[in-house]
Image (cartoon, grey):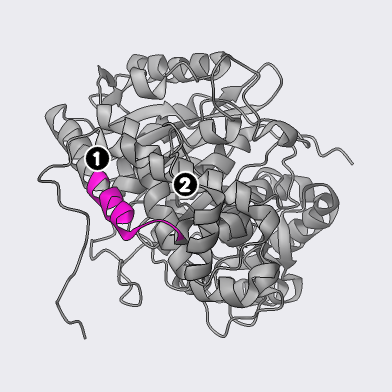
Amino acid sequence: MTDKNELINLSVSQASDWLAAGRVTAIELTQATLDRIEKTESVVHAYATVTAESALEAAQQADSEISAGKYRGPLQGIPIGIKDIIYTKDIPTEGGSKVLEGFVPDYDATVVTKLADAGAIMIGKTVCHEFAYGVNEPPTRSPWEINSYPGGSSTGSGVAVTVRSAFGAIGTDTGGSIRIPASINNIVGLKPTYGRVSTYGVMPLSWSLDHVGPMTRTVKDSALMMQVISGLDRNDSNSADVAVPDFTASLEDGVRGLRVGIDREYFLYPGVNDEVRSATEAVINELAEMGAEIIEVRLPELELTPETLFTVMMAEASTYHRQQLREYGDKYDPATRATIQLGELLPATHYITGLRARELFRNASMNLFKSQRLNAMISPTMPLPTALLTELHNPRTDMDIDETPMISYIHHTFSANLCGQPAISAPCGFTSQGLPIGYQLLGRPFDEATLFRIAYAYEQAHDWHTRQAEIKH
Amino acid sequence: MSYGRSKANESVDVDKVRWLAESLGLDVAPEELDALTVSLSNQLSSLEVLEQFNLKNVSPILKMDARWYD
């Protein structure tokens, strides 16, 4: 039998190859993952619910099918974590909140159904910030620095993937909640194009900003998961009727001739930490050496993205919680409750103004991409690496700027949610303190394939994504 | 949490926020009113950042697709 440590270090793609070749069984992969959960959970608290029994049953089913030649695809037999705001039939889905303590949905979200149809093994429900709002403090901890912010709101998904207690995971992203934990935890996180992946069966934070996407160790794994979870869903009124391409078809095409824009004034503003700046510049230089054209651009409308997103998100989130807040207000975390109350006090005219500002930004972004013939833009995912939890809401101490770390984190991620463009975060190095650094690519609508192509080319030249944090008990 | 980069809105005070919350049926604990007032003040003033951009002739993003599907 193969060493379990070796098994959990396989990527989705590698594990899939091993399954197909008969080198490993789905039961072995699932048991190795469950053993890893047992070993790490007391430290990292990535899971709200571990579905060991059903996972082993599903693995048994996968092995039977594989033996019988019934091949469902590369996710067959692969253990995957699901963020706990995503409905899973007959399995608790509590959204990180006491409000939903004990709630068990009677249907699966579309993304869960698609993964099951592909033969993936749901290993458990991952911890998230309360209702994905990102303002309370869940119990999850990142192994990279146990006293620091582990990222959110797809907190558990990010941590599970980095500690190898899931081969991949599903997160959601309304303002950076896939990309920020991906960057902090040294993994790949994709926010797809708005409407690319169904949000049916996913508790909304903000209907017009919510996205569902994969969190994985490698770029190829992200593409493989996207192949399964993408596509039109009539149950989701915002689902896009756009053909799903083969996301891996151009993966190895390299970056020669691709045009990648950088707005240094916004994305490398004075609030960007020196080590993050250096790491990002290194990625830019390397892409140029690989044959990409780096285009210096300026998109002044980026300046309105933080206020615009907050205005839109607050109104929509507070609308969703309106009735529940009145019935169960005392069960909300105080920080979440206060933020929802705030959204209720905003005039409708503010929300509509936010939508106008959003249209202004979307048009400006589109015009920039078209006029400069950009295939992507690049930025650091976050202006700084993770901060200590105790410092998160205090003025930054790493440099002289009047921002808290939490405010800085969202500086680069909001724009992609506002205009719905795809955005990926991938590893690009570590600080001198050993904290992961991620870079972000922003793409054209429904062109996730080009983001995968660029990120894959860079990933092949480095081993950042193979590094693991030590689990300190 | 709000994202106020502008000066706080001075016309917002605790009494007004208490009245507004009560009118809307919101049960805000007395000890949480001050923080809510500051947040609302910041959030209201944050609109100034958006209105510095030329929104004249910009329609809001609103989608209404009247098509029926099977």
Measured as percent of width and height from the top left, residue B66 is found at 15, 76
Between A453 and A334, the one lying in front of the other is: A334
Between A271 and A446, the one lying in front of the other is: A271
Amino acid type, mark 2: Val
Figure check: A458 above or below A359: above
Measured as percent of width and height from the top left, residue A245 is found at 28, 55
Q: Which residues are magenta?
A: A345-357
Which residue, given by chain and number where applicable, does mark 1 sit on? Answer: A361
Instruction: Provide the chain ID for the residue under circle 1.
Output: A
In the picture, the quarter occupied by the N terminus of chain A is bottom right
Give me the disc on residue A122: none
Residue in the picture at 74% in, 67% down: A50
Between B49 and A306, the one lying in front of the other is: B49
Number of other residues with Cα within 10 Å of mark 2, as a class: few under 14, some 14 to 19, many 20 or more:
some
Residue in the picture at 39% in, 18% down: A284
Taking the image as shown, residue A372 lies to the left or right of residue A445, namely left
Judge whether residue A15 can be spotted in this image: no
Residue in the picture at 77% in, 53% down: A45
Figure check: A15 above or below B22: above
Residue in the picture at 63% in, 34% down: A466
Give me the disc on residue B12: 2
Tell me how far mark 2 sits from mark 1, CA to CA.
Answer: 29 Å
Choose top left, top right, bottom left or bottom right for residue A444: top left
How many numbered discs? 2
Q: Is residue A269 magenta?
A: no
Instruction: Provide the chain ID for the residue under circle 2.
Output: B
Amino acid type, mark 1: Phe
Residue located farthest toward the front when viewing the structure as drawn: B15
Measured as percent of width and height from the top left, residue B48 is found at 32, 37
Name the front one of labels 2 and 1: 2
